[in-house]
Amino acid sequence: MKVPWRALLPLGLALLLFPLALACGDDDSDEPFRIGVMESATGPGETYGTVAIQAKELAVEEINAAGGINGRMIELVVEDSKCSAQDAITAYNKLTDVDGVKIILGTSCSGAMLGAAPLAEKDGVVMFSGLATNPDIAQAGDYIFRTSLNDAQLGVDTGNLLWEDGVRKLATISESTDYAEGVRRTTAEQFEELGGEIVGEERYASDATDFRTSLTKLFSENPDALHIAAQAEFAGGTIVKQARELGYEGPIYSEIVVVGATALEIAGDAATGLKAVITDIDPANEKGQEVLASFREKYDYVTLPWYLASAYDTVYITAACLEETNDDQDADGFRDCLYAITWSGGIGDNYSFDERGEVVGLANVVVEVLPVSERNEDNNGYKVLGPAPIK
Amino acid sequence: MSVIPQALRERPRADIERVATVFVLGWAVAFMLWQGTGFTVTLMTVFAIWAILAVSLNLVVGFTGLLSVGHIGFFGIGAYTMAILASDASYDQLRTEAIPTPGWPFFAALPIAVALTALVAIGVGIVFNRFRDDIFVLVSFGFAIIAFSFFLNLREITRGAFGIHEIPRPAFGGWVLDGEVEFLVFALVCLGLVVLLCWLIVTSSFGRVLTAIREDEEAIAVFGYQVTHFKLAVWVLSAMMAGLAGALFASWTSFIDPNSFILLESMLLIAIVILGGLATIWGSLLGAMAFVLLEEGMRFLPFLPAEFVGQARQVVLGVLLVLLMLFRPQGLVGRYRL
């Protein structure tokens, strides 16, 4: 086949110039507030990233429908950070250099956050995440904030719960990711500080599907309980299922991933009675329930409810601070507003940010998975037992 | 035997190459004019790093005919060596993995990063020299997996999944290249040196032996050439260049974790080399430029819902690469098919 390359050249140039024409729009004097969003629309954190983007768009729609902020609308400029440091840097530079934003909501992946944070700190750009949980982010700088609780707290709470439930010998299995490894590590540390003994540790790669060998090895040590730290729901649910298939009847402890909808569907009845320390929306929190209902109405599904509401809250907090500064280019004013603000929203009441940009005033809760016959959309498959124990 | 003169037979191919070159360079200039210098500097830095990787991989894949998918492993070794030696982060107050951070200057860590990559490449290359063709692809695949496993599981050295941050930028005395433009200039100088070295290699008698190895390994061995020595030498040189790219990458991003060195990145690298053309240095530069423009240019697709833009970019990129392979399997300016 002979390809008419010469004929294709003008066509190619026309395609290249097409975005130029699009860029030359009308200059509107009543400009909206432009806020950047960096989430993992693709890559390993795609589930979290997509939910976060949708939750933020929902919040912006609501704010704009109610008249905006000081009469101005909010416009989100969304970029994919792909859960990677390099892509986070290019996404960050696109947002700041091309779109000129000074406030970025995101990211959902800690690796991406840690990649872009030094640039944000140097440029004086605020990065405000609803989902990143790596403890290292606490040291990322003065312009870095998050509404999500860090993994270290989750591990400490889980260690306390294990000890309080009478567990003295623990076996752990964890996925080799920063999140899961962080949870395992802090859980084990806290448990050992209280006097417990780790009798077995196993790790698995993110693409693993068969955990029987690791589990058999762990159960040979006769642990009082099994702790699972997973990043992906598929693996988390499969581990629970395979543990029961191997005849293990002891208690299983975990965190948010293993009580996700997909994990519980895979595990089935094997997950009944499993306890998890998670961030969860208080059933009595009307705002939280409203957020979930609105999300379900718009997108016809709900997953990762706490993280969804956390991303949603970041937009409303942003709106509150923009109302005060009335300038989307005033990152310093926005940062000072975040330090000063106390907020009640979808993820809890009266929470604020400490001097490291870490959220304070929120706590994890302990949940127990219900039998399959009692699981439904309203209870997400588990019941809340109460706040996580403090030692 | 064809009666058409050689010059006439080659003319259409030369035309296509010129069109491809003008197209990619025109695209780059249009993009720069459109988006201004700030974002362009970022993209050019990404281009410089990927171009070093592509040019160095082309030495092995294009010029010597060894299809290696393990290049990302050497990239990672360079990056991790730089990160471990140069990072001055303190992890003491965090409840995560703490590793010693010597905080060496960039230029003290750089030779170690390149030398360590070379050492690993020698060890791996001696083993890999026993394999050819499909088996070589499989063992290089294995190397990429093993390297990733080391980065992820050697937690006492690499911090595993937590990654290493606060990796410093290069500094000449008191002058730190912490500006994006300064770093870009430095990266382009490194790219220039790599291109120069590759050009010297491929235009030398050594390079002609490499090409002969690609065409017929047994035949060149008959003439008394120690084929394994040549293959090992080019393998190590290529790995050292990848190590340099890794060190640059770690310094530029200031944070690395194992996710930057997954097998998929190796596949993208192979795609860049094929996109540009096998056995051509200019093709690798053009391929890297075209790839960066394709991937990052699609951030500006204006008509998609926000949550689908990322997926759409990947689909469009994949389709464009498939179309290119269908209609131009030798790449933009290449002379050989894979």
Image: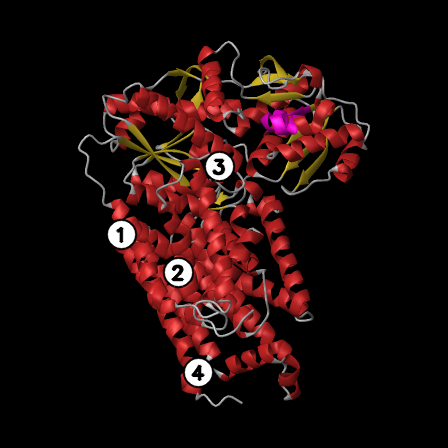
Q: Is disc 1 on the same chain as disc 4?
A: yes
Q: CA distance from mark 3 to mark 1?
A: 30 Å
Which residue does the numbered mark 3 point to in the structure image?
A109
Q: Nearer the viewer, residue B98 or A84?
A: A84
- Classified by dominant secondary structure, the portion drawn in magenta counts as helix
Identified at 48% across, 78% down, the residue is B202
Residue B9 got which mark?
A: 4
Q: Which residues are drawn in magenta?
A: A253-264
Q: Nearer the viewer, residue B118 or A282?
A: A282
Q: Is disc 4 on the same chain as disc 3?
A: no
Q: Which of the two marks, 2 or 3, is nearer to us in this view?
A: 2
Image mark 2: chain: B
In the rendered image, residue B91, in percent from the top left (x then y), is placed at 49, 38
Q: Does residue B177 appear to the left or right of B226 in the view shown?
A: left
Q: Nearer the viewer, residue A233 or B319?
A: B319
* Vertical order, A105 against B38 (above or below): above
First in sequence: mark 4 vs mark 2: 4
Image quadrant occupied by the C terminus of chain B? bottom right
Query: Which amino acid, mark 3?
Result: Cys
Which residue does the numbered mark 2 point to in the structure image?
B289
Residue B34 got which mark?
A: 1
Q: Which of the two marks, 3 or 1, is nearer to us in this view?
A: 1
Q: CA distance from mark 4 to mark 2?
A: 29 Å
Q: For residue A183, which quarter of the picture?
A: top right
In reply to whether residue A263 is colored magenta, the answer given is yes
* Vertical order, B66 against B101 (above or below): below
Identified at 49% across, 19% down, the residue is A292
In the rendered image, residue B258, in percent from the top left (x then y), is placed at 55, 47
Q: Visible in this render: residue A386?
A: yes
* Within-10-Å neighbours for mark 4: few <14, some 14–19, many 20+: few
Residue B86 got which mark?
A: none
Task: Give the structural element (helix, strand or loop) at label 2.
Answer: helix
